[in-house]
Amino acid sequence: MFVLSAFADEISADPREQIAVLQKCRIRYVEFRSVYGTNCLALSDAQVREFKKMLEDAGIGVSAIGSPIGKVPIDAPFEEHLRKFERAIELCQMMGTRNIRIFSYYPPGNDPQFDPNRWPEYRQEVIRRMQVKAERAAQAGVVLFHENEHRIYGDSPDRVLDVLQSVNSPALRAAYDAANYAYCNYDPVEGWEKTKAYTAHLHIKDWKKGGHAAGHHYGVLAGHGDGCIAHSIRDAVVRNYHGYAVLEPHLRGGGPTGGITGPDLFPCAVEAFRLLLQRCGGQEG
């Protein structure tokens, strides 16, 4: 059963417009990343409560806190980052979800010229930090979803698997993003096959390989790129997947803090995924 959700800040920074489009698309959940152009972790309690009230009035729930936790250099101070992580846990309680999306750290100094072959030098610290957060999550009764993201330790199928196996905690699962594997020139099918046993969350966006090299910094409709999304969806159906499928189309672009699709194109992205889901034998819940 695939329950549709959305990074609604791709629709608009205005929460009212986000909600209006979600209702138009018959989507009953949101992955809470930002409103008013402000990341969820930087919002005041009053702003969070206001947004929660808007969602409740519209009959919309929260699938996960779409936090940026782990999107900092591996050599950045850990204690400061842990304080932000605690805020993400607080938001779970405030927004009525048990789930937090996280990442596994940028290279030291966020060096854009970092050689991925050097990651073994920092692996132990990556695993240590992820273990600390998984233990804290278990104590708080929340689940962390690690997203395979460009330039972090867990951007390749092997390193994602390394994180999940090394931490070895039910409080740390995988959020599978086929487009991110394609963007990083990894095989999305390999990514799925190596991590599917840990995957409990799906991000739905697609990507044409080589697009960024050609100056195209935007996603494509699900099933129209090189993410091989149908492979993962068909296999998820066979595996009796029951969880969220979160629309994150990036149809007008994307970057480290999020993507843009717009209120006009977002319904097209939803329709494309619903058609793909139907073709793959999946049921929407």
Image: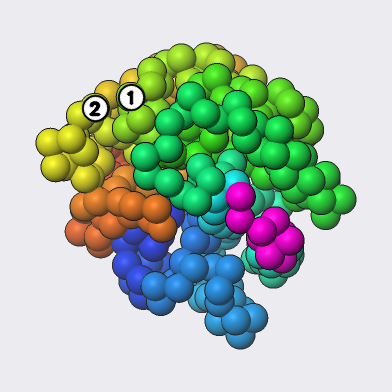
Instruction: Please tell me whether residue 79 belongs to the stretch shown in magenta.
Output: yes
Mark 2 vs 1, N-terminal side:
1
Q: In which quarter of the image is the N terminus?
A: top right
- The residue that mark 1 highlights is 185
Residue 90 location in percent, x, y? 72, 67
The magenta segment is 75-83
Q: Dominant secondary structure of the magenta stretch?
A: helix
The residue under the point 32% across, 61% down is: 11
Q: Can the viewer see residue 44? A: yes
Single out the residue that lies furthest toward the right: 139
Q: Residue 159: which numbered mark, if any?
A: none
- The residue that mark 2 highlights is 209
Query: Badge 1 local density, few (<14 within 10 Å), some, or many (20+)?
Result: some
The residue under the point 60% across, 81% down is: 44
Mark 2–mark 1 contact, CB under 8 Å?
yes
Cα gap from disc 2 to disc 1, whole angstroms: 7 Å
SS at badge 2: loop
Amino acid identity at mark 1: Asn
The residue under the point 44% across, 23% down is: 233
